[in-house]
Amino acid sequence: MVRIQKQDFSVTEEIERVKRASKSIGGVVAFLGTARDISKGEEIVKLDFEHYPGMAEKKLQEIRERALTNFNIIEMGIVHRIGKIDSGDNIVLIVTAAQHRNDAFMACEWAIAELKRIAPIWKKETTRKGEVWVEEHP
Amino acid sequence: MVRIQKQDFSVTEEIERVKRASKSIGGVVAFLGTARDISKGEEIVKLDFEHYPGMAEKKLQEIRERALTNFNIIEMGIVHRIGKIDSGDNIVLIVTAAQHRNDAFMACEWAIAELKRIAPIWKKETTRKGEVWVEEHP
Amino acid sequence: MVKVKFFAMLKIKAGREEANLAAPGSISLEKFKDILKKDFPGIAEFIDRKSVMISVNQEFATKDTMIKDGDEVALLPPFSGG
Amino acid sequence: MVKVKFFAMLKIKAGREEANLAAPGSISLEKFKDILKKDFPGIAEFIDRKSVMISVNQEFATKDTMIKDGDEVALLPPFSGG
């Protein structure tokens, strides 16, 4: 239910994977992070994501397990892409499924904030001025 | 960006439709309502949705316009299915897209609550005991 | 004539989807409800329920809404979409 | 030997992805940082930054973490995933 991969993903397929967990699911919330074309006024040519293999997957798994413990949700899936990502493309997807929508919303919001906080993943932005490793979550 | 239809929809396609609005989109939130198999302890055989043609579409359009005015979002799409819906199938999808995720989450949560409040759409549940028009949002 | 539409549970209770009622000029929502209750005694108790909303020309009516010839009125039981 | 891994900006600054350092028995994180700073003067200022985290065997280290032979240590600049 937790993956880091180079290739793109299908939101529909990821939601189906999560929905297979139970027929009691009544609400699914998905957060999809996509590559914006502008950052701090600079046009972004491309993004490059690097991760700490092993530890990054472990931290995503930890986020899923803590979410299943702390929120009234049935299942959670996380996919994060690495490597080169063009403007407009998918970066990350978090899917939460619950009997009732409020629980799914809360868990999804928490999970993306936690991912940004603890997952060892780094973004390099390439603009016309050059490349820079982003430090937006110090 | 707002539809009521009998046939199923693809979450991926609906998100792509919303994302086409701007390359500044950095966060997309989707709420997908699906047909649970159990309601108040009774196994649900199927659901049937009826709507007020014309007024229902108008109210969904109104929700989208108010969301675009009141939240810092770039686009919103809504699809609601009507007719017969089997357990596990998609019922409703609300997609919000923003530069920043918090705005997308807030607008999406507001929109589904508002849809339940003002959209003239009715659900009939068929269980082994018979059919009943649901009155969960009085 | 005023077209009246019935939905969901009220469609079953009224035994029909639509009706055409003669409206004497422009009348208040309250007066129109009285006509409805008389013409459809089977749903009279629902018409008085706070949870049953009424729309006029596809907008929610308030107690100040006036109903006139050519309007489309609908009886809306509690919504359950989403 | 202790394997040290560098990521993102620190990989560029250190000019390498990995290094193997001899660790004298079991030493504290602070002592290990001193060794790192001596061996990699180019990133010494980053090692002291609060925003740069250190992991030991793929778990976040605290000031009580001890480092011993066979461990995998990583220098983690501020994350920017998601």
Image: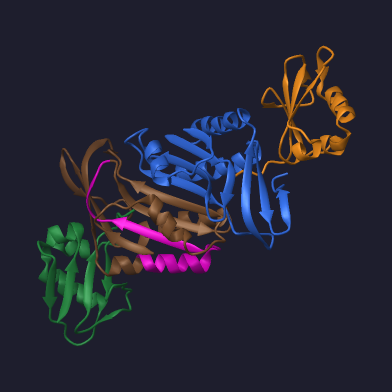
Chain colours: A brown, B blue, C orange, D green
Is B59 or B29 nearer to us in this picture?
B59
User: Percent from the top left, x then y, of residue A45?
Assistant: 20, 40
Left or right position of C41 against A115: right
- Which residue is at a point 68% across and 41% down the rendered structure image? C79
User: Percent from the top left, x then y, of residue A129?
Assistant: 15, 39
Is B5 or A28 nearer to us in this picture?
B5
The C terminus of chain B, quarter of image: top right
- Which residue is at a point 87% across and 27% down the rendered structure image? C39
User: Percent from the top left, x then y, of residue B28?
Assistant: 41, 44
Hey, which quadrant is residue B119 in on the image? top right
Left or right position of D46 against B113: left
Is A130 or A108 nearer to us in this picture?
A108
* Residue farthest toward the top in the current orientation of the protein: C25
Q: Is residue A67 magenta?
A: yes
Can the viewer see residue A107?
no
Magenta stretch, residue numbers: A60-87
